[in-house]
Image (cartoon, rainbow, N blue to C red):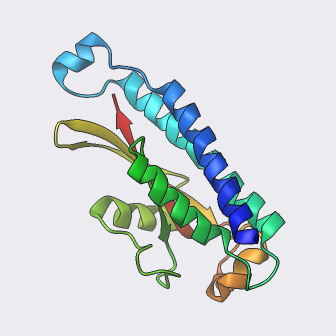
Amino acid sequence: MRSRQVMGLLLGTAVLAMTAWGTTRQSLHAEDAKAGKPGQESVARGRRTAMMLDEVYKNAIVLITDKYVHDEEDFPAGSAAVVLFDRVTKGGSHAVRLIDATGKPYDEDNVAKDEFEKAAVSKLKAGAETVEQVVQQGDKWNLRVMTPVPVVMKKCVMCHAHYADAKKGEPIGAISYTIPLD
């Protein structure tokens, strides 16, 4: 029953985040569109969107861990986040992935997959607060953003014993975002 509550809460969070994301999307100015690349205002909007999504997702994961994860048999909030992120990505508004930064992933699918993610994990582990890059994929422009995920409570270590060695504030994971720039 608890895993259903967790998924319900996470899915509600996704609806709120995607609704908020939709209200921040705007078209490029005419001069930017003629040049075929995103302007500074578009990139700034993408950055604000990524940071808003990051706050929503991380707060949801911490809240779920705090309220619903009591022992090793409970459905981990990180696992719920992976399912949520997959559904959000399939929805097409933006792409989001949870990535291991320890070298000992809980799930082999949660590793850095491309050059941006690999470089960003290294930068986050070296102390960067966020890493971003504007990229063109086909005829579309996207803002790639990665933010750190540190251990923030003892319950995080319950399912991930190897996180106990992490220093306070050290990223044990990351969230990778791909935000379309319209």
Residue 39 lies, in percent from the top left, at 32, 24
Q: Nearer the viewer, residue 146 or 75?
A: 75
Report the quarter where the C terminus lies.
Answer: top left
Q: Nearer the viewer, residue 65 or 163?
A: 65
Report the quarter where the N terminus lies.
Answer: bottom right
Asked if residue 81 is positioned above or below residue 33 in the image, the reply reads: below
Is residue 149 visible to the viewer in this orientation of the structure? yes
Q: Is residue 159 left or right of residue 24?
A: right
Residue 88 lies, in percent from the top left, at 47, 51
Q: Nearer the viewer, residue 148 or 14?
A: 14
Asked if residue 132 is positioned above or below residue 74 in the image, the reply reads: above
Q: Residue at x 59, y 47 (%)?
A: 14
Q: Quadrant of residue 108?
A: bottom left
Q: Quadrant of residue 78?
A: bottom right
Q: Residue at x 67, y 66 (%)?
A: 169
Residue 113 lies, in percent from the top left, at 32, 68
Q: Nearer the viewer, residue 160 or 89?
A: 89
Asked if residue 158 is positioned above or below residue 180 in the image, the reply reads: below
Q: Residue at x 74, y 85 (%)?
A: 72
Give the farthest residue toward the front: 1
Is residue 127 visible to the viewer in this orientation of the structure? no
Give the farthest residue toward the top: 30
Residue 137 lies, in percent from the top left, at 21, 45
Q: Quadrant of residue 64?
A: bottom right
Q: Residue at x 41, y 73 (%)?
A: 111
Q: How many marks?
A: 0
Q: Is residue 136 left or right of residue 166?
A: left
